[in-house]
Amino acid sequence: MDRDVRTITNPATPHDPTPFGYTHAVPAPGALVFIPGQYASDATCAPVPGGFAVQVDLAFDRLRPALEAEGPGYEHVVRLGTFVVDHDAAKPEVLGKALLARFGDRLPARTLSGVASLALPGMLFEVDAIAVRPAAPEA
């Protein structure tokens, strides 16, 4: 019989995702950590108002505790999936500034998908990530 090898991690912030059917971080056996869609939510899971730039910055801020709960930080992210509601020519610049602020010149591979809507009304942006857990220091 196969044994479930998944571990789930739900840091105290930003909110408890289990009522919505997902987990903040799932480390794979070995070195990979999968972070599902993070968005600009308040403590009740509601999307915060304030427009696209505000939601982009807060979604990336929400990504950090999910990563750190399993060991990696932004510097260990190897892939991002970004989802933009009502994509237009101005949004990649906003997204680029947020990425550079967190990743500097070491940007991960990334996909930008323009979408009609996301999981909750008012969500304008969502990001998911794959990170590589840092190697343990040699003894």
Image (spheres, rainbow, N blue to C red):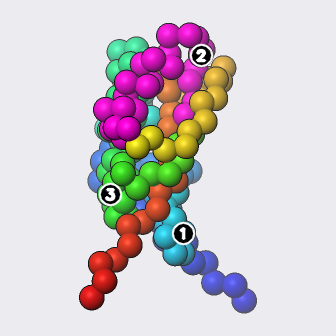
Pointers 1 and 2 in contact (C-beta within 8 Å): no
Looking at the rendering, in which quadrant would you find the C terminus?
bottom left
Q: Which mark is residue 87?
A: 2
- Tell me where residue 48 sits by quadrant: top left
Mark 2 residue type: His
* Amino acid type indicated by mark 3: Glu
Rendered location of residue 27, percent (x, y): 49, 66
Q: Position of residue 21 (x, y in %)?
A: 56, 50
Label 2 sits on a secondary structure element that is loop
Residue 69 at x, y percent in the picture: 33, 61
View extreme (front): residue? 105
Residue type at mark 1?
A: Ala
The magenta stretch spans residue 96? yes
Q: Residue 94 versus residue 19: which sits nearer the camera?
A: 94
Q: Is residue 81 visible?
A: yes
**Residue 97's disc number:** none
Specify the segment rendered in magenta. Answer: 82-105
Q: What is the quadrant of residue 88 in the picture?
A: top right
Measure the alpha-carbon separation of dots 1 and 2.
32 Å
Task: Tell me the number on the disc at residue 28.
Answer: 1
Q: Give the Cα separation between the discs numbered 1 and 3.
A: 15 Å
Question: What residue sits right under mark 3 in the picture?
Answer: 68
Q: Earlier in the sequence, mark 3 or mark 2?
A: 3
Check the image and report above or below for 66 versus 101.
below
Quadrant for the N terminus in the image: bottom right
Q: Is residue 50 above or below residue 119?
A: above
The residue at 34%/64% (across/down) is 71
Q: Is residue 41 visible?
A: no
